[in-house]
Image: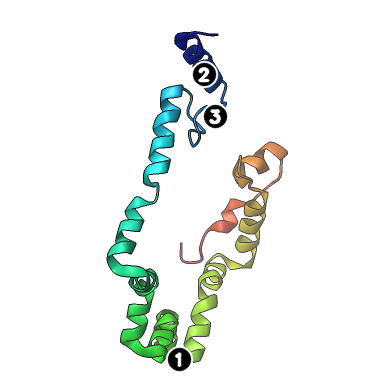
Amino acid sequence: MASGQESTEELERMAEEGQAIVPGGTGGKSLEAQEHLAEGRSRGGQKGGQTRKEQLGHEGYQEMGSKGGQTRKEQLGHEGYQEMGSKGGQTRKEQLGHEGYQEMGSKGGQTRKEQLGHEGYGEMGKKGGLSTKEESGGERAAREGIEIDESKFRTKSS
């Protein structure tokens, strides 16, 4: 029969190979590590939450789980809570009115197009379409010999 030291060495070797030696010690790379893991798992891997559950009782603990979002809903009532969900964008729409809000949505790109004129805007689109993650549209155009007339980029005011 093998001595105690030989069997311990054998168990250590098996643990290093990833075998579970101690029930609940899965994942430990040594006999000692597996013993510690097993001890922690058997003693209460869920103890923290369980203690709070024991303090509050089953119903109180369940109530606490859904309380956070509900509290605000209860304060405002159902309609107020729903109204709050869509309020942000609506307020600006109400300030400007339907037509003004619609106009604001398409204004950004249109203004730039008006500044550059039709040709400049087209040239800029051509340059943008050539860009990739690796290089800018200007670099690629130069490499491939594509002409882009940047003089057309000048705004009408300059």
Residue 41, quarter of picture: top left
Residue at image point 66% right, 41% down? 140
Q: Nearer the viewer, mark 3 or mark 1?
A: 3
- Extreme residue in the left direction: 55
Displayed quadrant of residue 61 = bottom left
Q: Earlier in the sequence, mark 2 or mark 3?
A: 2
Going by the numbered disc 3, the residue's amino acid type is: Ala
Q: Nearer the viewer, residue 87 or 128?
A: 87
Q: Secondary structure at mark 1?
A: helix
Whole-Å distance between the Cαs marked 2 and 3? 9 Å
Check disc 3 and report its element: helix, strand or loop. Answer: loop
Q: Sequence order check: which comes first, mark 3 or mark 1?
A: 3
SS at circle 2: helix
Q: Residue at x 55, y 8 (%)?
A: 1
Q: Amino acid at mark 1?
A: Gly
Name the residue: 55% across, 73% down.
Answer: 110
Inspect the image, locate mark 2, and give the three-letter code of the amino acid beneath it: Leu
- Which is nearer the eye, 20 or 158? 20
Q: CA distance from mark 3 to mark 1?
A: 70 Å
The residue carrying mark 1 is 97
- The mark found on residue 11 in the picture is 2
Contact between labelled residues 3 and 2, with CB atoms less than 8 Å apart? no
Disc 3: which residue: 20
